[in-house]
Amino acid sequence: MNHVLKAQQFTPKLMSLIFNRAAELEVIMHDKQRHEKLGDLLSSEMLFTIFYEPSTRTRMSFAAAGQHLGMQVIGTENAREFSSAIKGETLEDSIRVLCQYQPSAIVLRHHENHAAERAAKVSKVPIINAGDGAGQHPTQALLDMYTIKKELGRTEDLNVIIGGDLLHGRTARSLSYLLAKYSGNTITYVSPKELKIGNDIKAHLTKRGVKFIETEDLESVLPDADVVYWTRIQKERFEGEAVIENSYHISKKHLKLMKKKSIIMHPLPRVDEISTEVDDDPRAVYIEQAGNGMYVRMALIEWVLGYLCTTSSDQ
C-alpha cells in the first residue's frame, strides 16, 4: 500500500510525477468538458477524512479533491471530542473498525506525534497523514514545494527563510525535509530562541550536507531570500508553559528589503504575523498556495490508489 506518512518518503522523481499531474489537473479543472469526465475516474472509490484536530484548508481540500475525482467522501471533524475517542477507544481500534466499512483510503489528522504511523500498522487501506501533532504534515510540504516550483520555476539553488514558531510547527519540519532533497538549497531559520527548530531536523540537514543558519534578525537575511515561509505561533501546543508572544510581524517595510523575484508563503491560518497590507503585493502567494493544495492532493490520491503509476526506482 502507498501510505503517506512522512515527508522523507518522497523522492525528487516521485515529487516530479505528482507535481506534473497536479499541473495537468489544474488545467483540466478549468476545462468544463474535461472536468466533467474527470469525475468518472474514481467513481467506485470512497475516501474517509478523520480529523481529531480542527482544520479548514486540509480537510476541505481533501474532500474537494476526492469529490472532483468522483469519489464518495465521508468525514468527521473534531473526532477528538465527537467520536468514540472520548469514551477511551484507541486510535488503532478506530482504524480497524473504519476499515470494515470498505473505504479506499483514510485521511487522518491527529493530535499525537506518529499517529499516522500507528494507524498504518493496523490499517487495511492506505493512510494519508494530514498532520500529526507537532511532528509532520507531508501533504502540506508537497503543496509548498509545488508552489515554489510553480512560482519560481525551480526547486534547487534556493535561499529559503523559514520563520515563526519552529519548535511546534509541523509544516516547517516537513518542508525542511523536502528542501533537503534538492541540491544547492540554503535554509535560514528565523525565530525567537525559545522556538528554534528541533535538533533532529538540524542533524538531518547536517547529515545530508544542507547549509542552514539560525538567526533572530529577520531584516538582515531578507535581501537574499528567494522564499520567505512564515508561520504563526502555535499557542495550542504550549502545554503547561507560558506562550511565547509573536515578535515578528511582516509588513510593507519588509517588502522593501526583498527581491522583486521572490515569494512570501504561509501554511495558514494567519493571525497577525503577516499584515493584511502585504496581501496585494504580487510576491504574497499564500492564498494561491492554499489553492494549490487541492490539485496536489488530487494527484496524491491517484498515486495512493494506484491510478498514477510509478516504477520501483521512483519510490
Image (tube, rainbow, N blue to C red):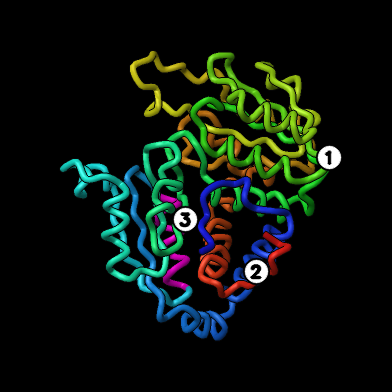
Mark 1–mark 3 contact, CB under 8 Å? no
Mark 1, other Cα within 10 Å: few <14 / some 14–19 / many ≥20: some
Which secondary structure lies at badge 2?
A: helix
Residue on which the image places disc 2? 21
Label 3 neighbourhood size at 10 Å, few (<14), some (14-19), many (20+)? Answer: many
Disc 3 is placed on an element classified as strand
Label 1 to label 2, Cα distance in Å? Answer: 25 Å
Residue 94 rendering spot, x and y as whole percentages: 27, 53
Q: Which residue is mark 1?
A: 184
- Bin the neighbour count of mark 2 within 10 Å (Cα to Cα): few under 14, some 14-19, many 20 and up: many
Q: Percent position (x, y) of residue 231?
A: 54, 33
Q: Nearer the viewer, residue 243 or 253?
A: 243
Does residue 285 lie above or below 271 as drawn?
below
- Hey, what amino acid is under mark 2? Arg
Distance of label 3 from label 2 (alpha carbons): 18 Å
Q: Which residue is found at the position 55% from the left and 32% from the top?
A: 274
Residue 248 spot, x, y in % from top left? 57, 22
Q: Earlier in the sequence, mark 1 or mark 3?
A: 3
Amino acid carrying label 3: it is: Ile
Give the extent of the magenta segment: 56-68
Of all residues, the one furthest to the left in this rendering is: 87
The residue at which mark 3 appears reads as: 128
Q: Does 19 appear above or below 68?
A: above
